[in-house]
Image (cartoon, grey):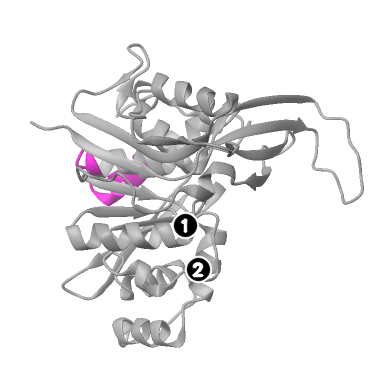
Amino acid sequence: MAPKTIQIVGSMNIDLITRTPRHPNPGETLTATSFNYGPGGKGANQAVACARLSGSKNHRQTSSNTKIEMIGAVGTDFFGNYLLDELKTSGVDISKIRKVEDQKTGTAVVIVEESSGENRILITPGANASVNPPLPIYPLPDLIILQLEIPIPTVVTIIQEARDKGVDVLLNPAPAVDNLPKDIYKGLKHLIMNETEAVILSANLDDEAQEQWERERGNRSAGKNTQDTCERFHALGVTNVIITLGANGVYYSFRNEKEGWGEGGQVPAEKVEKVVDTTAAGDTFVGAYAVAVTVDGKSVVDAVRWANRAGARTVEKEGAMGSIPWRDEVGV
């Protein structure tokens, strides 16, 4: 049987990580606790999450029934080669990653507040800005994962092409932007976002989307809650909507095709011994969910539960990509 293929099209960065007792105020200079650098970028992190969460830490390889492909770009510098080596070590197929002459590899400056584990991030796209069509997505995979750290027109083009070819797409709209065309949601299989992203994206749905949502809702009771937010995206064509809520867990909603609206619920947050670093939690969740629904054949609810568990293991460790767990560290 041919292996299940998950293709991640997205950003590849080097994370420059500073740990500090607290975030500095405007105009304030603080002495940091430590500095380090490591591989990152939402695309690269999600690719590594998919690979590790379909493989074994002991054997350092993905399962034989899974293929994880990364499509992106790096510069012809030390950081670019370093990134490629790190992805390959985790079991990611790097054959479709392009090296761009006269471009620096993308960077992300990450400031981690030790007291809370929360982070602030500044991104310089570098070679990521050159990730433009045509891209080597053929042969077509079982699932394509996209984020918004590469040019938006590229994301739109790939979603349209995948829709035309009948390939499922998982969109993680991060960082959220307020000018996404509403057509991007038509036929979208999975939409995974956090609370902030959900607020930004739902607030910018136009009047037509609002009217369609209200028609879909019919006579059911109104209420500005998470399920109502999910249903606005269902009305535009999204099948499964997942909103991560931090310490409050995860909200999920899947479209009931017969009834025409979403059915949702909330999964509580997993217990964590100590929050050390939240940088890669969202990317780990996306990768775990993708593996669960595509490779393991789990339901949306079970996939959310497993992804929630994987994300919880991530925040207990320092760093971004280095904190992403392997499958046998999460359990099935």
Closest to the observer, 121 or 162? 162
Q: Is residue 12 visible in the rendered structure shown here?
A: yes
Quarter of the picture containing the C terminus is top left
Q: Where is residue 200 in the image (x, y as percent from the top left)?
A: 55, 68
Is any part of residue 253 visible from this angle?
no
Local SS, label 1: loop
Residue 173: which numbered mark, if any? 1
Q: Distance between the residues labelled 2 and 1?
A: 9 Å
Residue 152, which numbered label? none
- The correct choice, above or below, for 111 with respect to 203 in the image is above
Q: Residue at x 25, y 31 (%)?
A: 67
Q: How crowded is mark 1: few (under 14 residues within 10 Å), some or many (20 or more)?
A: many
Residue highlighted by disc 2: 201
Q: In which quarter of the image is residue 3?
A: top left
Q: Are marks 2 and 1 in contact (CB under 8 Å)?
A: yes
The spot of residue 248 in percent (x, y) is: 52, 51
- Residue 298 covered by magenta stretch: yes
